[in-house]
Amino acid sequence: MKRRWVIAGLVLAGLLTKTPQYGTDVARLLPIEVIQMEKRGNRIYLYTDTEAQGVGATIQEAVENMKQTAPGTVFLETADYLLVDRESLPYLPESAEYIRPGSKLCIAEESLDLQKTAQFLAVHTPSTTLADYRGGITHISVITCRKETLILEP
């Protein structure tokens, strides 16, 4: 008798976790590969290869803004690359709360086509990660665009 109640409880728990109100519509997922962070004035701007954008006075505000305005569910934790301008470097420790530590870092002083940049960086991978930077490694490769050609300077 006890065994039946245990099995019934497991079945009920399984059914409750499968209901639509607890799930996420897969078609609305926005897995991000590249994030570009720029600081202009007292605002931080975030751009992604999925065209999601966010702006705020802090990283947290920019991420929240991005999640509210994106046409789907944003997953910053999937980002393989984080591009920052030099003014954004002091915000890297805070960004680690939202972006996975294994994301590769590049300095980008200009806005780039992030979809093309994702393809380029898949072949020309920078060496420093967000975790490396937080651990004290301060050398970050620079990515530039010259005459529509991306160049990664070690």
Image: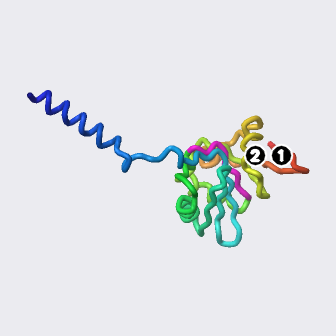
Residue 130 in the figure: left or right of residue 112: left
For the magenta stretch, what is the residue range?
A: 78-85
Residue 46 in percent (x, y) is at 64, 59
Q: Is residue 125 magenta?
A: no
Disc 1 residue type (three-letter): Leu
Q: Is residue 68 above or below residue 138?
A: below
| Residue 132 in view here | no
Q: Is residue 80 magenta?
A: yes
Residue 39 in percent (x, y) is at 69, 65
Residue 78 in the figure: left or right of residue 5: right
| Residue 73 in view here | yes
Label 2 and label 1: CA atoms lie apart by: 8 Å
The residue sitting at 77% across, 37% down in the picture is 124
Quadrant where the image shows the N terminus: top left
Q: Nearer the viewer, residue 152 or 89?
A: 152
Q: Which mark is residue 117?
A: 2
Q: Which residue is mark 1?
A: 150
The residue sitting at 80% across, 42% down in the picture is 154
Residue 151 in percent (x, y) is at 84, 44
Q: Mark 2 touching mark 1, by CB under 8 A?
A: yes
The residue sitting at the left extreme is 1
Disc 2 residue type (three-letter): Thr
Q: Quadrant of residue 90?
A: bottom right
Q: Earlier in the sequence, mark 2 or mark 1?
A: 2
Q: Secondary structure at mark 1?
A: strand
Residue 24 in percent (x, y) is at 45, 47
Q: Nearer the viewer, residue 45 or 13?
A: 13
Q: Is residue 122 above or below residue 137?
A: above
Residue 6 in the figure: left or right of residue 41: left
Q: Is residue 118 above or below residue 109?
A: above
